[in-house]
């Protein structure tokens, strides 16, 4: 498996172009649409799961020149059932300096499987799709809900302007130590905001 670098992207309103409209395209592009991507699809046939969800459909085969800088796609997905088409889409995207996800072979981009647990997301990649699916199912079953519960309450604290101000007055080493203690408390079931604030900031509330 390549030494891929995992990253989380905010795709809200982001233009994504996808060539191919079959089952694999739906599997790869559907989650992007869920994340807010604005998908333009080039394909004579479009999977029913995508027909009403994409921003635009160009109902024909792909042609070199369809993807161009004026379209401003942030990401290109090569999801045709024809390998030669995917190869051409990848080459065209590379020539424009665009990230391209090619679904029929490993390339310079890969999408991990997502394991949602309430508002928590775990990403899984093994280089073997069947193994990734098995591991994802295992994690979805075995992850304790306390992790998602802790994430929810701790995110609120981290975003709080007053909390940020109080923490900024502390030395970095103390901030890090306080966060570790606060995480421990949240994972032990403490969900009282003021109790967690006292641990995190050292102040009385």
Image: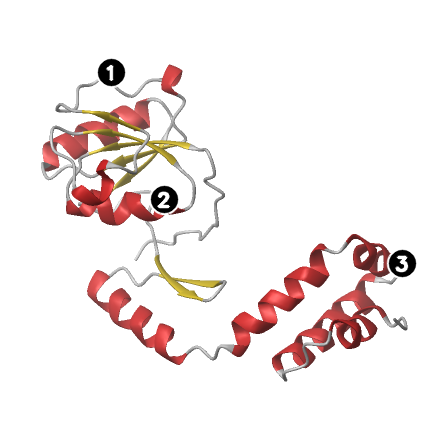
Q: Residues within 10 Å of mark 1 (few under 14, many from 20)?
A: few
| Residue at 30 percent of width and 63 percent of height | 126
- Disc 3 versus disc 2: distance between alpha carbons? 40 Å
Provide the secondary structure element on which disc 3 rests.
loop
| Extreme residue in the bottom direction | 188
Residue 41's x, y, as percent? 25, 30
* Closer to us: 56 or 97: 56
| Residue 150 picture quarter | bottom right
Judge depth for marks 3 and 2 and give the one in front. Answer: 2
Q: Residues within 10 Å of mark 3 (few under 14, many from 20)?
A: few
Q: Residue under label 3, please give it.
A: 169
Pointer 1 and pointer 3: residues touching (CB < 8 Å)? no
User: Is residue 18 toward the left or the right of residue 170 in the image?
Assistant: left
| Residue at 72 percent of width and 62 percent of height | 157
User: Is residue 117 toward the left or the right of residue 91 in the image?
Assistant: right
Above or below residue 20? Residue 195 is below
Judge depth for marks 1 and 2 and give the one in front. Answer: 2
In the rendered image, the quadrant that contains the N terminus is bottom left
Q: Residue under label 2, please give it.
A: 32
* Closer to us: 5 or 28: 28
Provide the secondary structure element on which disc 1 rests.
loop
Residue 95's x, y, as percent? 31, 23
- Disc 1 versus disc 2: distance between alpha carbons? 24 Å
Residue 66's x, y, as percent? 25, 18
* Closer to us: 183 or 172: 183
Pointer 1 and pointer 2: residues touching (CB < 8 Å)? no
| Residue 129 picture quarter | bottom left
| Residue at 72 percent of width and 74 percent of height | 182
Disc assigned to residue 65 = 1
């Amino acid at each position: 498996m390549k030494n891929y670098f995992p990253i989380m992207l905010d795709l809200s309103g982001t233009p994504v172009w996808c060539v191919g409209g079959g089952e694999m395209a739906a599997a790869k592009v559907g989650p992007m649409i869920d994340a807010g991507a604005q998908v333009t699809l080039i394909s004579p046939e479009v999977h029913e799961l995508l027909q009403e969800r994409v921003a635009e459909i160009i109902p024909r085969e792909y042609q070199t020149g369809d993807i161009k800088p004026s379209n401003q796609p942030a990401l290109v997905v090569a999801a045709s059932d024809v390998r030669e088409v995917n190869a051409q889409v990848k080459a065209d995207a590379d020539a424009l300096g665009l990230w391209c996800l090619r679904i029929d072979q490993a390339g310079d981009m890969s999408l991990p499987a997502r394991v949602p647990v309430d508002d928590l997301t775990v990403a899984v990649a093994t280089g073997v799709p069947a193994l990734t699916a098995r591991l994802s199912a295992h994690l979805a079953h075995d992850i304790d809900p306390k992790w998602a519960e802790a994430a929810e309450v701790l995110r609120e604290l981290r975003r709080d302007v007053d909390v940020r101000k109080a923490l900024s007055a502390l030395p970095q080493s103390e901030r890090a130590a306080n966060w570790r203690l606060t995480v421990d408390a949240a994972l032990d079931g403490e969900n009282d905001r003021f109790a967690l604030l006292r641990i995190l900031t050292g102040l009385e509330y």
